[in-house]
Image: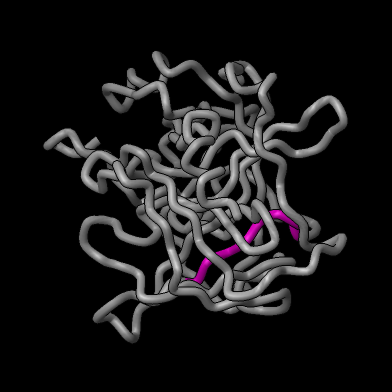
């Protein structure tokens, strides 16, 4: 939390391991910025349909920088190599998104053409009506991303996809670190069996998911914020997907 009450938006995967294969619903985002032709930003996202991905709104506009275009990377566990790549400039940001406080931190990207579903590329399931009231507290969830693995890392041409298991905690625990946590936020613990775990810079917008009884992934969170230092052991925060189903469905097709 910043001194003025805002949340640090440099969302940060810590304590995880290299993903042995691509997650078929995960899409990396290489982001070009308006007025900064030599700079790029990076985020994650989740494929929801043949031509829609969901990400964090601050991946488009963080209060300072605004995206001019997104390169959407599907079906690869390498950020800069392989997979299926789409360029889009079409983004729908949640109408009540606030970049200062990172509230309603959700956006939908429109792909320019339909993706053909394969074993390597297909969408993640959204929560169903029975799961709508589930807080998922105590569940073991998984976060995925191309983000940093420590506070000193930089992006390279061999940046690889990583994943980490995280424990969903109640919002009161999360509020001990960040102050007020709204009900439309879901949090995970920053402490794992072997030490600090969580998200890091570049993981923003990526999925937090659990497995249903059939072991199918269900999207429950969109990576939004974390502690200023990735390896601090503090919780990570995500936009709670069940709170944004109306917005997501409105822009799904």
Q: Residue at x 45, y 69 (%)?
A: 90
**Which quarter shows the N terminus?**
top left
Q: Is 138 on the left-hand or right-hand side of 247?
A: right
> Which of the two residues, 148 or 135, is positioned nearer the viewer here?
135
Q: Residue 4 appears in which quarter of the rendering?
A: top left
Residue 43 lies, with reference to residue 94, above or below; the image says below
Q: Residue 142 appears in which quarter of the rendering?
A: top right
Q: Residue at x 81, y 63 (%)?
A: 117
Residue 69 x, y percent position in the rendering: 42, 75
Residue 24 lies, with reference to residue 212, above or below; the image says below
Check residue 124 for magenta coloring: no
Viewer can see residue 138: yes
Viewer can see residue 76: no
> Which of the two residues, 29 or 177, is positioned nearer the viewer here?
29
Residue 159 x, y percent position in the rendering: 60, 69
Q: Residue at x 68, y 55 (%)?
A: 49
**Which quarter shows the C terminus?**
bottom right
Q: Is 89 on the left-hand or right-hand side of 206?
A: left
Q: Tell me how many marks there are.
A: 0
Q: Residue 234 appears in which quarter of the rendering?
A: top left
Looking at the image, which residue sits at the far left? 4
Residue 169 x, y percent position in the rendering: 52, 19
Residue 198 x, y percent position in the rendering: 52, 39
> Which of the two residues, 234 or 184, is positioned nearer the viewer here?
184
- The range drawn in magenta is 22-30
């Amino acid at each position: 939390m910043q001194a003025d009450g805002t949340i640090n938006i440099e969302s940060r995967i810590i304590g995880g391991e290299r993903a042995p294969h691509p997650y078929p619903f995960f899409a990396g985002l290489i982001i070009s910025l308006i007025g900064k032709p030599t700079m790029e930003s990076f985020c994650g996202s989740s494929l929801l349909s043949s031509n829609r991905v969901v990400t964090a709104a601050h991946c488009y506009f963080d209060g300072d920088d605004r995206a001019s275009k997104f390169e959407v990377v599907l079906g690869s566990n390498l950020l800069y190599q392989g997979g299926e790549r789409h360029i889009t400039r079409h983004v729908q940001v949640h109408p009540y998104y606030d970049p200062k406080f990172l509230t309603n931190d959700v956006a939908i990207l429109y792909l320019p053409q339909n993706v053909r579903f394969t074993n390597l590329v297909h969408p993640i399931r959204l929560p169903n009506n029975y799961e709508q009231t589930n807080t998922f507290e105590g569940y073991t969830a998984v976060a995925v991303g191309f983000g940093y693995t420590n506070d000193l890392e930089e992006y390279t041409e061999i940046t690889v996809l990583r994943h980490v298991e995280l424990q969903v905690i109640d919002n009161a625990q999360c509020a001990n670190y960040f102050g007020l946590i709204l009900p439309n936020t879901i949090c995970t613990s920053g402490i794992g069996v072997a030490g600090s775990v969580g998200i890091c810079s570049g993981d923003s917008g990526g999925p937090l998911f659990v497995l249903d009884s059939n072991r199918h992934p269900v999207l429950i969170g969109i990576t939004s914020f974390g502690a200023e230092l990735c390896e601090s052991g503090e919780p990570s925060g995500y936009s709670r997907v069940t709170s944004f189903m109306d917005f997501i469905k409105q822009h799904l097709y």
